[in-house]
Image (cartoon, coloured by chain):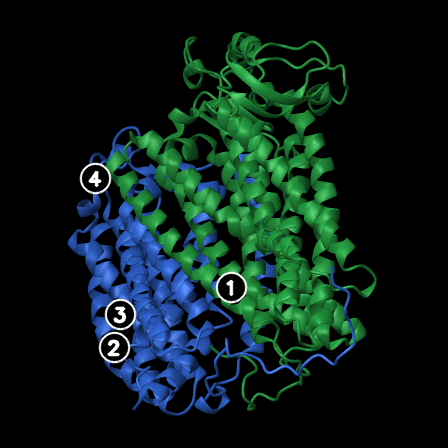
Chain colours: A green, B blue
Amino acid sequence: MDALDLARWQFAITTVYHFLFVPITIGLSVVVAGFHTQYLRKRNPEMLRLSKFFGKLFTINFALGLVTGIVQEFQFGMNWSAYSKFVGDIFGAPLAFEALLAFFMESTFLGLWIFGWGRLPEKIHVACIWMVHIGTVLSAYFILAANSFMQHPVGYKYNAATGRAEMTNFVAVLTNKVQLVTFPHVLLASYMCGGAMVMGVGVWLLHKKKATIDRDMYRKAARVGAVVTIVAGLGVAISGDTQGKVMTEVQPMKMAAAEALYTTRDSCAEFSLFTVGSLNGQKEKFAVTVPCLLSFLATGSFNGEVKGVDQLKKELPAQIDAAAQQRGEPLKYVQPADAVFTPNIPLAYWSFRLMIGIGMFAALIGVAVLWLTRKGRFATPRWLVWACIAAPLLPVFGNSFGWIFTETGRQPWLVYGVLTTSSGVSPTVSAATVLTSMVVFTVLYAVLAVVEVKLFLDYTKRGAEPFHEVEQRSDDDTLAFSY
Amino acid sequence: MTLETFWFIVIGVLWTGYLVLEGFDFGVGMLLAVIGRGEDAAETNTRRRLMLTTIGPFWDGNEVWLLTAGGATFAAFPAWYATMFSGFYLALLLVLVSLILRNMGLEYRYKRDSEAWRRGWDLIIMVCSFLPPLLVGVALTNLVHGVPINAAGNFTGNLFTLLNPMSLLGGLTLVAVSLTHGAFYLALKTDGPVREKAASFGDVSGPVAAVLAVVLLVWVNIHTGDAASWIASAIGAIALVVAILANRVRRDGIAFLGTFLAIAGTVATYFLAVFPNVMPSTTDAAYSLTVHNAASSHLTLQIMTGAALVFTPIMLIYTAWTYWVFRKRLTMHVIAPQTDPLAPIDVPAHPAGADEATV
């Protein structure tokens, strides 16, 4: 493998790993904040216990999300320096905004929340965990704005003198139409992760702690988690549907790849649930399909035209060239005529289905939990316990597949239609160097995953701490929290 | 002043912020090995818990200064960011690994009551508090020293190019200053034996840091300095001497402020000495990256300036508030006895007949 392949692998590994923790951070912070607020309003001890309990799980997870995020920021300069130079003018700004507006808020207020029990006035203390949540949301907004620029570059012009893309309209970058559909989709998917985590942990503890008085509390947690999962899940479906239409408009090749559709269908294109075959357009052996659904997903009409890979392959190069010329760009960023304009189609096809499928499955588990715990019931049949052990992982992996689809579906472009991935890699970093860091991070991440999962499970098993009223302490009392 | 110069200053301020803030928590981390030692395992643990609690609410926010310095460089000087991060690749890799492990150590150390678990994370915290200041010191000094950069603006050296004597001295100095800064911080934030030990450690490490810093600053100024950078160095050096003297008479606040200013003076020296370059090329001065040829477009700089002017004060206010909330000195007594966070909880049995509807 050359430096380019290795840099791509490293980006994939570090990003997917980072994004296992991010949606849980966003989703759990809002549930923890919700429980804590509820305690303040109703003085129900259970709410405080749940807030502290899930707060602990949150901090275990937050730590890993944060540190793997530093790698993300530095990686652009380390492995993708040509890209960083080319688009730094546009791409750097949301990143700097993210640090200044979001990261400081998250870290500082999380510190205040963890160490502030009994030290801060109650209302300010609960506001701190909300600030943490707002920080995570802002962070998501800015980083997605940066990513949306890569999917659909807007608000810039090419400067021939400096040889790079320069910003012309920052508002356009922040309100990119891809961004406007991606942000709600990702945010809701993150809420789904938080909800499914709370639901899964709740059901599991309900099952484990058969003989304790805490069952009411865990039942409540499971139901709250289920509601969040279902509601967010519906939102994910709706926003995802809108996103599909925008994607078809700005990146038609991605939609064609998502369905492995080679031949253009002028109306009523069917959507395949799964396919047994090579997905290369020739040897489809068996597929289960829903008629006209693809047309609807792509265009909003059951009779809409969906362009296939073959036709797009012919059309896209000329379109991209024409667009580049209009912007006054030299064609050095566009590959020659024999270039491959298609992403890895089986990968796009399967990641698209897995994203949708396992996300829907998580929402269905939520429905089952609500049904089985209705009207004061506590039923946790064995299959549901198993499903709820899987529940936290489903939306998390759904997110991963979503990102794999989004990012690989954009290939061979780093910035769609403007900069190819191969032109963005660091020119003077050797393959050996990239390999070294890839191995180091992969091993380190694997070890940390083991440690974090073990801790997470141990803390989950232990369950919520007994209720202690939060007393305001004087400065000379024993600290409510110390290392 | 042009926007480019303004952003050069902003990045200097961000590095200052990073090194003065994370500087003391690196110092505390390293000092676990020295000050965090009691008569027995239990006392060692309490001391370390006390030391870590002094930085507990802050270290995470301190680290964000690094992320912001990186992000601001990316946005304001993309070419600088690209060349520096791809050029200093392996050094940065080590910094990242250290920061990851250190953060995990700080977060996970107390999450399990086991001597072996704690000992492992303590070792990681100590080593990974030592490596970043060493490597960051080496990297920043290289920015002043100059590195091989070709006509295309790419770094052409390797890891060993970065290990020149001046930069190694820069790394060692930052370690020594961070140790002293951390010791003064501990003296300021604690009472009792930890405070005693921290202050007397500062009595020894302070002069060592001062000698290293003076040699480094003189060398940097002779290398590329001007009047302004000499003045900044002088301020930094005087601040360090005042800090050492203040620590001798146990005026903790002044001592800490002194190392704070000493670090600020050093960063200012670096930035003034190298200006208008941001990464001088040793291959050919014409290939050097400067605030002009490495900067973003005027529009980006304007937007960033607006954001910085609005949001930096807000950020500074709540950061300052955190330091205010947790301003009190800590003693061993306020640290609760070690308990097992994973001990099983005694919960009364469920009263019979209150539920049950099973499938």
Say whether disc 4 or disc 3 marks the residue closer to the N-terminus. 4
User: Where is residue A83, by image quadrant?
Assistant: top left
Question: To which chain does the residue with label 4 belong?
Answer: B
Whichever of labels 4 and 2 marks the residue nearer the N terminus, that label is 4
Pointer 2 with pointer 3, Cβ within 8 A: yes
Find residue B49 and report its horizontal and vertical position in percent.
42, 80
Secondary element type, mark 4:
loop
Q: Is residue A329 above or below residue A190?
A: above
Which label is found at residue B205?
2
Q: Is residue A102 above or below residue A469?
A: above
Label 1 SS: helix
The residue closer to the viewer here, A159 or B158, is: B158
Work out how far the residue at label 2 is from the one at label 3, CA to CA, in angstroms. 7 Å
From the viewer's perspective, is the residue at label 1 or at label 4 nearer?
Answer: 1
In the image, is A220 to the left or to the right of B59? right
* Pointer 2 and pointer 1 on the same chain: no
Image quadrant in which you'd find residue A161? top left
How far across and down, in percent of the image, does residue B43 sit?
Answer: 36, 88
Residue drawn at (34%, 68%), measured in percent from left and top? B125
Q: CA distance from mark 4 to mark 3?
A: 28 Å
Q: Gap in Å between the C-alphas at discs 1 and 3?
A: 41 Å
Above-or-below relation of B176 to A403:
below
Q: Amino acid at mark 1?
A: Leu
Image mark for residue B157: 4
